[in-house]
Image (cartoon, grey):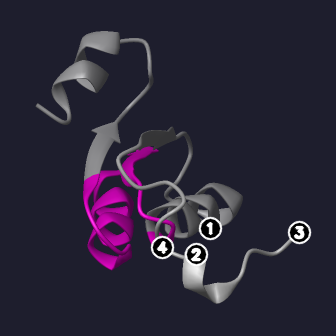
Amino acid sequence: MIEPASLAGTRLQDKVILVTGSTTGIGEGMARLIAHEGARVMIHGRETDAAQKVAADVEGDAALVIGTLEIQERLRRSFE
C-alpha cells in the first residue's frame, strides 16, 4: 500500500539503516528511498568513489562503510 504524500519523509525518522551493496543497482535505490523517508543511511560498498557519490546524492544524513562487513567495529564508529 502506498502511503499518502503527507507521510513521505517521516516514516523512518530517527532510524539508522545500513544498506549493504548500496553503491549500485537495487541497493542504491533502497538507500535513496530510505533516506527520502527520513532515516540516516549507512552506504556500504567496496569502492570509495561510488559510495561517496551516492552519499552526496541522497537526501539527509549518510555515512560510508567501505569494504567488507567483517569488521563490525567500523560500523559502530560510523555514526559516533
Element class at badge 1: helix
Task: Give the CA separation, mark 3 to mark 2.
Answer: 13 Å
Q: Disc 1 vs disc 4: Cβ atoms closer than 8 Å?
A: no
- Which of pointers 3 and 2 lies earlier in the amino acid sequence? 3
| In front of the other: 56 or 6 | 6
Q: Is residue 24 left or right of residue 18?
A: right
Range of the magenta residues? Answer: 36-62
Q: Are marks 2 and 4 in contact (CB under 8 Å)?
A: yes
Number of other residues with Cα within 10 Å of mark 4, as a class: few under 14, some 14 to 19, many 20 or more: some
Q: Residue at x 43, y 12 (%)?
A: 70
Of the two numbered discs 1 and 2 on the same chain, state the one appearing first in sequence. 2
Residue farthest to the left? Answer: 80
Q: Disc 1 to disc 2, how far (Cα)?
A: 19 Å
For label 2, the crowd category at 10 Å Cα-Cα, with few meaning under 14, some 14 to 19 and many 20 or more, is few
Task: Indicate which disc, 1 or 3, sits on the residue closer to the N terminus.
Answer: 3
**Disc 2 to disc 4, how far (Cα)?**
6 Å
Q: Is residue 42 magenta?
A: yes
Q: Which mark is residue 9?
A: 4
Secondary structure beneath label 2: helix
